[in-house]
Amino acid sequence: MRSVRTVLLVTAGPLLLAVAGLMHPGGLSAATADRWVHLHILLLPIFPLLALAFVVLLRGRPRADVAGVATVIAWLGAAVYAAGYTGLDAVAGIGAGTVAGQPGDQGELRRLVLALYGVGDPLGRVGVYGLLVAVLAGTVVLVSRHGRRVLPGTVVLLGAGYSFVDSHIFAPRGVLTMLAMAAGFALWAWAAREPAGEPSSGGKDLRGTAAVYSNDD
């Protein structure tokens, strides 16, 4: 049951973004501006949900070792993503859509929209680069805990992240990118699962140690 909850938590963000991508206008114009703005307002709390996987799967206090440092780097990369992509959503989504829907000279409005894109797009790219750093650092942590079975998820996530740099969530490519992101996080969650009813290695070691001391007595 815990594994199912974990999969739901780590895939909720990309799956919601895939659905939103199906409703996302293919371009911004006076005709689509209203829908563009309202969709991006709804997406404000959803884009950061991609970072949730790194909190859920890498939970626990980092130790003073390589895996601990990688955990902190993964969390920082996820935070950079959340901040950067929220900035893109606000500037190139809500801001540009609001400008495009105003009355006036269409050439001048287009110039302003492009200026907002010029601010928002780099924020989004920095955010995705942060996400890719988080994937690489998260892989170091998960391999140290669960072995190489996490690597298929890493390959899928890196491919999805590379596509995300310029696909946004526009259908069809952006939707497929989000579905791939969900698949990658699900593979990570599956690889990180604890077998049902099987205690952790730490529990086995403690019981074994207790038995040794008991026999010595």
Image: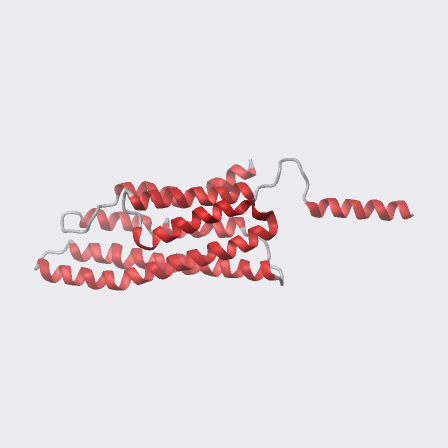
- Using residue 82 as the reference point, say whether residue 122 is left or right of it: left
Q: Where is 3 relative to 206, above or below?
A: above
Please state the horizontal and vertical placement of residue 147, each as a whole percent of the image: 59, 48
- Looking at the image, residue 5 lies above or below residue 162: above
Q: Residue furthest left?
A: 105
Q: Residue at x 21, y 54 (%)?
A: 97
Horizontal side, residue 110 vs residue 72: left or right: left
The answer to which image quadrant residue 102 occupies is bottom left
Q: Locate residue 71, reporting x and y percent.
A: 54, 58
Q: Position of residue 6 (x, y in %)?
A: 51, 42
Total marks drawn? Answer: 0
Instruction: Specify whether 91 is left or right of 199.
Output: left
Q: Nearer the viewer, residue 143 or 190?
A: 143
Relative placement, left or right, of 148 versus 124 is right
Front one among 172 and 110: 172
Q: Residue at x 56, y 39 (%)?
A: 2
| Colour convention of the picture | secondary structure
**Quadrant showing the N terminus:** top right
Where, by quadrant of the figure, is residue 211 drawn? top right
In the rendered image of this protein, does residue 143 appear above or below residue 76? above
Q: Which percent across, then down, holds residue 180?
A: 40, 43
